[in-house]
Amino acid sequence: MSDTLSTTAPQAGSPLVSVRGLSKHYGGERRLLGGSAPLLKAVNDVSFEIAPGETLGLVGESGSGKSTTGRILLQLETPTAGNIAFRGQDITGLSKHALKPYRRDMQIIFQDPYASLSPRMQVGEFVGEPFDVHGLSGSRSERQDRVASLFRKVGLDPSFMKRYPHEFSGGQRQRVNIARAIALNPAFIVADEPITALDVSIQAQIVNLFQDLQDELGLTYLFIAHDLSMIRYLCHRVAVMLRGRIVEIGPCEAIFDNPQHAYTRALLSAIPVPDPDIERSRRPLSFDVNANLPSEEAVLRPVGDRHFVLEG
Ligand SMILES: Nc1ncnc2c1ncn2[C@@H]1O[C@H](COP(=O)(O)OP(=O)(O)O)[C@@H](O)[C@H]1O
Ligand SMILES: [Mg+2]
C-alpha cells in the first residue's frame, strides 16, 4: 500500500457517473385511520459526480443512507426525486429492458463476502456465471480460460476454481466476489463496505487489490465505508454522509488535512493511530448527531478547491 495520498485525481472530461438532487424517502404513506406513517429521508438531496478512473469514498455512520445511495446509482432502487446519469445519459427510471446494456457496465460488491456466494456452487462456476447470463460463455475451455484469468487477476490460484465457498477465508471469498464483479469488464463498481467484515490485516490487502484493478482496468469506484480508516489509501475524493445528507465533500487531502464539518472531524478523530505513543493520547471527538442535524435549508458551500461543506 502506498503511504502517500492519492493526489492526482482524474478530472479531465465529463463524469462517468453523476447524480443530481437524489432523494429516497421511506414511509409517509397516509394511514387508513388518518395521519401518516413516519417519513424517513434515507437519502436527502444528494448530488455528486465521479470522473472516469476516480474513486469517491462515501463515509458515514450506519443508517446514514450510504447503501441506499449506492443501490439507487445502480438502479436497484428508484429514487423519490433526482436523476442519475451514466456516461452523460439519464438512466433514471429506465425499464429493465432499457437498463440491460448498463447492467454489464455497473457492478456492486457487498460487505459480507459469504452471503453473496452460493454455498453449493463451485466458485469457478460462480465467477463465470455472468458470461452465461449475457451469452458470452463460448466453448467449455474458453470459459475455463476466462475464469482462470479472472482468478489470477484477483490473486487467487486458478486451481481453486473447483472449490466451494466454505473452503475459503473471508479475504479469499471477497476476492471471488471481486472476480465475478469484473468478469464483464464493467466501467463502474459500487463497493458497499467490502472490507468492513474482514480482519484488519486482510483489509489492506483487499484495498491494494481494488487499487491494482483500478490501475489495470481503469475502473471507477464508489467505495462505501462507515469510517475513514482505509479511505485515505484508496480514494481520490471523499463524501461524508450524515442522516441522508452529504455534509462535506472534497479531495482526500482536504478532508484529511483540512476538515471543515464537525462530523468529519469526529470521524477523523476516531481513526486509530499505528504509533502507540500518539495512540495513547488520541482523544476521539464526540459528535451529537441529534443536536447537530443539518436543517432542510442547509446548502453545500465551497470552502476550497472542489471542497464543499454543508452550512446551515
Ligand atoms: N427498504 C427500506 N424501508 C424502510 N427503510 C429503509 C429501507 N432501506 C433502508 N432504510 C432506512 O434508510 C436509512 C438508510 O439506510 P442505509 O442506506 O442502509 O444506510 P447505511 O448504508 O449508511 O447504513 C436507515 O435508517 C434504514 O433503516
Ligand atoms: Mg450500508
Image (tube, helix red, strand yellow):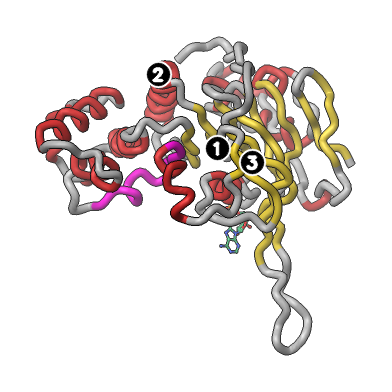
**Label 3 to label 2: alpha-carbon separation:** 25 Å
Label 3 beta carbon within 8 A of ligand 1? yes
Viewer-nearest of labels 3 and 2?
Answer: 2
Residue type, label 1: Ala
The numbered disc on residue 92 is none
Q: Earlier in the sequence, mark 1 or mark 3?
A: 3
**Taking 40 as reference, is 213 above or below it?**
above
Nearer to me, 90 or 240: 90
The secondary element bearing badge 3 is classed as loop
The residue sitting at 23% across, 52% down in the picture is 119
Q: Which residues are magenta?
A: 105-118
Q: Which residue was labeled with disc 1?
A: 225
* Image x and y of residue 177, in percent: 33, 39
| Mark 1 surroundings within 10 Å by alpha-carbon count, few (fewer than 14), some (14 through 19), many (20 or more) | many
**Quadrant where the N terminus is found in the figure:** top left
| Mark 2 surroundings within 10 Å by alpha-carbon count, few (fewer than 14), some (14 through 19), many (20 or more) | some
Quadrant in which residue 307 is drawn: top right
The residue sitting at 73% across, 46% down in the picture is 21
Q: Examine the structure image and report whether residue 213 is included in the region drawn in magenta.
A: no
Nearer to me, 190 or 60: 190
The secondary element bearing badge 1 is classed as strand
Residue type, label 3: Gly
**Label 1 to label 2: alpha-carbon separation:** 19 Å
Nearer to me, 88 or 172: 88
